[in-house]
Image (cartoon, rainbow, N blue to C red):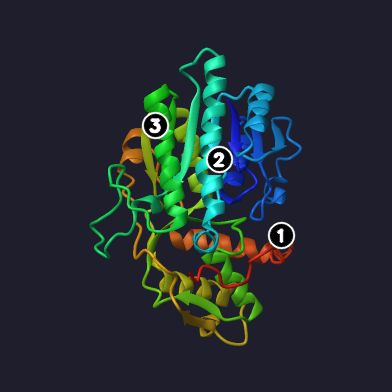
Amino acid sequence: MKLLVTGGAGFIGSAVVRQAIGAGHEVVNLDALTYAACLENVASVADDPNYSFVKADIRDRAALDKVFEDHVPDAVMHLAAESHVDRSIDAPATFMETNVLGTFHLLEAARAYWTAQGKPDSFRFHHISTDEVYGSLPADPEVQFTETTPYDPRSPYSASKASSDHLVRAWHETYGLPVVLTNCSNNYGPYHFPEKLIPVVILNALAGKEIPVYGKGDNIRDWLYVEDHAEALLLVVQKGAVGRSYNIGGENEARNIDLVRMICAILDRLRPGARPYADLIRFVSDRPGHDLRYAIDPSRIREELGWRPSATLEQGLEKTVQWYLDNEDWWRALQSREGVGTRLGRG
C-alpha cells in the first residue's frame, strides 16, 4: 500500500511512518517542517527505498496537486495539524488556517485526484483527530466518549479539529470521497515534542527545575502509548469501514497529579537525584477553559477491528522516561525552539 502521510515529521505522524515502513508499505511523508516537526524523528527509515519526503504545506493547493500527481498514493493519512492547546489560546488564527483551511485544501486535492483516477473504491482518506472535540466529561468513570457523543469543543484547538472532522464527513456525504476517521486520547512516548506535559515533567525534573501542574492536578486524561496508536491507525486505514469513525483510547485514565508523581518515581529509580523529584512539583494557575476529563470507550475498534492497546500506563511511562534519558541530543536540540520551556496559554 502506498501511503501519503501528512505531518509525518511530527510526533504521531513519525510513529506512523516508522511502523508503515517496517510493515513494508511505501510512504510519502509530506510535512511543512514547522516548529514542532523534526526529521530526526524519521531518521531510522530515511534511507529506506520505500520512503520519500516532500516539504510542503497543506495550505498550498498547487503543491498538494503535484504530490498526488507525482506519487499516486493508495491512501492519505492526514495527521498534519497544529496541536498544542496552550498555543491555540495565544494564537488561534494559526490553528484555523492549518487545521481547517489546510484540511479543506487537502480534501479538495484528494477529491480531484480520486476523481481523475476513476473514483476507485479502494482509495481512502483517513482523517486523524482528537477526543477533545467532544468537550469535557464529569469525573464519573462510567461515562465515556463514544463515536456518537455530540461535539462540544472548548478550546480554539479542539474547535479547529472539530471543524476539520465535519469537513471530512461532508466531503464523504456530498462527494462520495471514501473516508475513515479516528479520534484518539492523549498520546505519549518517544519523540514527544518537549512542550507537552510528560516531556515537560521529565526534562524539568532532570534540570532541577520546578515541575508545573495546572490547577490542583485533578484533570483526568486517558493516556495512549504512541506506538499503540500508530498500529491502530494503520489498521483503520486498511480495514476500517468507509464513512465510519473509530475512537482510539489507551484504557489508561489518570489524574494529572498522579501521572506526574508516577514519572517522578520512575526517575527516582532510573536517575536518582539528591532529593525526590516530586519535591519539584508546583501547582500553578490553571489554563483557561481546561476540560476536566477525557475518556474513550474503545468498544467499536475492539469489536469491529480486533484492536486493543498493548501498553499499560506504567509500562509506557517506563519506556518513555528511559527513551528521554537515552536521547538527550534529540531533545536538547529542540529546547531552543520558539515557546519551548515557557508558560503559554494564559488567555
Question: Which residue is rendered at x = 34% and y = 40% of the image?
Answer: 302
Residue 109 is situated, as x and y percent measured from the top left of the image, at: 57, 28
Residue 106 is situated, as x and y percent measured from the top left of the image, at: 55, 33
Question: Which residue is rendered at x = 34% and y = 62% of the image?
Answer: 293
Q: Amino acid at mark 3?
A: Ala
**Residue 248 shows in the view:** yes
Q: Nearer the viewer, mark 1 or mark 2?
A: 2
Mark seen at residue 170? 3
The residue that disc 2 covers is 102
Question: Which residue is rendered at x = 47% and y = 54% of the image?
Answer: 157
Whether 205 is drawn above or below 177: the answer is below
Mark seen at residue 330? 1
Cα distance in 3D space between marks 3 and 1: 40 Å
Q: Given the current orientation, which residue lies at the most extreme front position?
A: 93
Q: Amino acid at mark 1?
A: Trp
Q: Earlier in the sequence, mark 3 or mark 2?
A: 2
**Mark 3 falls on what kind of element?**
helix
**Residue 242 shows in the view:** no
Cα distance in 3D space between marks 1 and 2: 29 Å
Q: Amino acid at mark 2?
A: Gly
Using the image as rendered, state which of residue 344 and residue 316 is in the foreground.
Answer: 344
**Mark 1 falls on what kind of element?**
helix
Query: Is there a contact, CB below 8 Å, between mark 1 and mark 2?
Result: no
- How many numbered marks does the figure carry? 3
